[in-house]
Amino acid sequence: MVQLAAGKVVFVTGGASGIGRAAAIEFSVESAAHVVVADIDVEGAEATVVAMRGSGSSVQLDVTDDDAVAEAIDQIVNEHGRIDIAFNNAGINDVPHQFHDLPVERWDRMLDVNLGSVYSCMRHELRHMASAGRGAIINTSSGAGIVAAPGLPHYTAAKHGVIGLSKAAAQEYARQGIRVNAVLPGSTDTTMLQNFIAGDEGMASIIAKSNIRGELIRPEAVAAAVVWLGSDHAGMVNGQSLVVDGGGLVR
Ligand SMILES: NC(=O)c1ccc[n+]([C@@H]2O[C@H](COP(=O)([O-])OP(=O)(O)OC[C@H]3O[C@@H](n4cnc5c(N)ncnc54)[C@H](O)[C@@H]3O)[C@@H](O)[C@H]2O)c1
């Protein structure tokens, strides 16, 4: 059977938990040569490495620190010779606010973590991928990248921005053998979503019903799409936004 990540050197941010953890594990199941799991939560990142089958390592990284991002990515290339696939996935959510009541600090923090960090990761990844003449980047957007998430204008704007960044880079680097796509999960059963629901049965029910099958998406289902987007099987898929929500956003 074809292994979708065979021989690839992979970088995953937000790999301590949820979708990032599931993706790191799936890349290793699909025979990646090495998976670097980056997260601000280094213990969680290390636990992901332990759960993986193949070769992997963890690195403590705050993705909003551009110098630290550059250093982490340079180190991967120094140690492994290349970076083949990058999954820029670390992110945060927030409690809902009415648009005009959203504190500016929350706007700034959201844009830093959920959009600025993606730009930062991409520019350092692309530097290496462009000189190698190949590579695949997958950025985590959201259903909120194409429709507004109620009460979350900052999350909505950041996730729309991730799609824009992905398209811009896809267009610019296609001739250099690099593909850049976005994955757009629906409501996925992770720590982020459970914190958002936080024991609120009403909210839990609204979110579950927002998925067309009436249930939360498993992180592994998103991970499977991510690994495919990173693989040579998706070799002609570039600049696209792949919604993984069971069909809920079909209009
Ligand atoms: N869970 C959902 O329903 C859902 C839906 C759509 C999109 N997403 C997106 O998926 C991505 C992963 O979220 P998840 O649901 O797996 O959540 P999660 O909370 O389980 O995982 C997010 C990870 O990002 C890490 N992180 C946060 N800030 C960081 C920083 N500054 N530097 C490094 N790491 C940092 C966290 O420590 C955590 O391990 C996020 O970008 C999120 O916006 C999630």
Image (cartoon, helix red, strand yellow):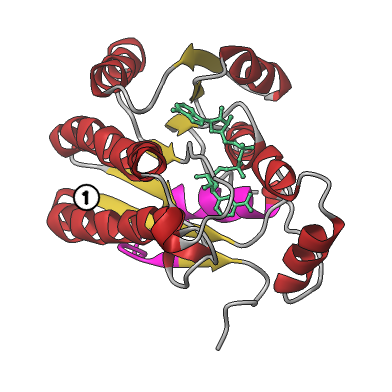
Q: What residue is disc 1 on?
A: 177
Question: Is 239 part of what is drawn in magenta?
Answer: yes
Residue 184 location in percent, x, y?
Answer: 51, 60
In the rendered picture of this protein, how many numbered marks are placed on residues? 1
Q: Which image quadrant shows ligand 1?
A: top right
Left/right placement of residue 14 relative to residue 236 reads right
Residue drawn 80% across the image and 58% down it: 204
| Vertical placement of residue 7 versus 213, above or below | above
Look at the image and give the residue range highlighted in magenta: 221-241
Residue drawn 27% across the image and 39% down it: 122
Give the overall secondary structure of the magenta segment: helix
Type of the residue with mark 1: Gly
Question: Is 201 part of what is drawn in magenta?
Answer: no
Among the 4 quarters of the image, the one containing residue 11: top left
Residue drawn 68% across the image and 71% down it: 246
Residue 1 location in percent, x, y?
Answer: 65, 49
Left/right placement of residue 200 relative to residue 248 reads right
Residue that lies at the very extreme toward the front in this rendered image: 101
Seen from the viewer's position, the closer of residues 215 and 125 is 215
Left/right placement of residue 166 relative to residue 221 reads left
| Vertical placement of residue 27 versus 214, above or below | above
Element at label 1: loop
Residue 33 location in percent, x, y?
Answer: 50, 25
CA neighbours of label 1 inside 10 A, class few (<14), some (14 to 19), many (20+): some
Seen from the viewer's position, the closer of residues 219 and 162 is 162
| Vertical placement of residue 235 versus 131, above or below | below
State which quarter of the image contains the C terminus: bottom right
Q: Is residue 8 visible?
A: yes
Left/right placement of residue 246 relative to residue 206 reads left
Q: Is residue 234 visible?
A: no
